[in-house]
Image (cartoon, grey):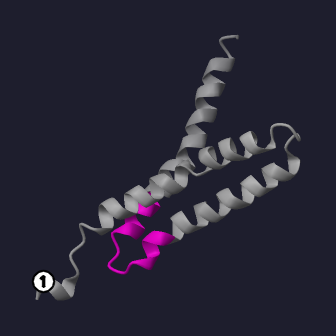
Amino acid sequence: MSEFMLPLIFIGMLFALIPVVALIVLQVYLSKMEKDWPGLVLPILSGCFSVLSTLMLLLVAVRGNAIITAVLGLVLVNIPTVVFILIYFNLHKKQVPKHELD
């Protein structure tokens, strides 16, 4: 690898990290809302995406390894869903409704 490639790889990884951080910040903001449903939007969308991508992976997978590929794909694609759900349950349970404070 040349000296020129290493900074490009670092910049590419940095730009790939920006949407991930933005989605996590958005999930934290939505989870801190008083109502339940805004904090569940990203986990539901992420879960739907993971199921659809696993179905697409099953359609394209090689015959012999289709099940292993689908299970591995489902586990890997569900990582953001698990992270979003953990953020939601961790932050939403700490919220005390305003009507209980009165």
Name the residue tied to disc 1. 101
Relative depth, front residue between 96 and 53? 53
Image spot of residue 25 (x, y percent): 43, 57
Q: Foreground residue, 4 or 89?
A: 89
Residue 7 at what x, y percent from top left?
61, 22
Q: Examine the structure image and report whether residue 9 is included in the region drawn in magenta.
A: no
Q: Would you place residue 100 above or below residue 59 in this image?
A: below
Please state the extent of the stretch shown in magenta in the rendering.
25-40
- The residue lying at 60 percent from left, 41 percent from top is 16
Where is residue 92 shown, x and y percent of the image? 32, 68
For the residue labelled by badge 1, is the local secondary structure a helix, a strand or a loop?
helix
Reply above or below: 25 against 33.
above
Q: Please, what is the three-letter code of the amino acid marked with disc 1? A: Leu
Query: Is 24 displayed left or right of 74 in the figure?
Result: left
Q: Is residue 63 left or right of residue 44?
A: right
Dominant secondary structure (helix, strand or loop) of the stretch shown in magenta: helix
Which picture quadrant has residue 31? bottom left
Q: For the point 73% across and 55% down, which residue is it?
A: 53
- The answer to whether residue 71 is above or below residue 50 is above
Residue 37 sits inside the magenta stretch: yes
Q: Residue at x 38, y 58 (%)?
A: 87
Front in this rendered view, residue 1 or 94: 94
Q: Residues within 10 Å of mark 1 (few under 14, many from 20)?
A: few
From the viewer's perspective, tell me whether residue 92 is left or right of residue 3: left
Q: Residue furthest left?
A: 102
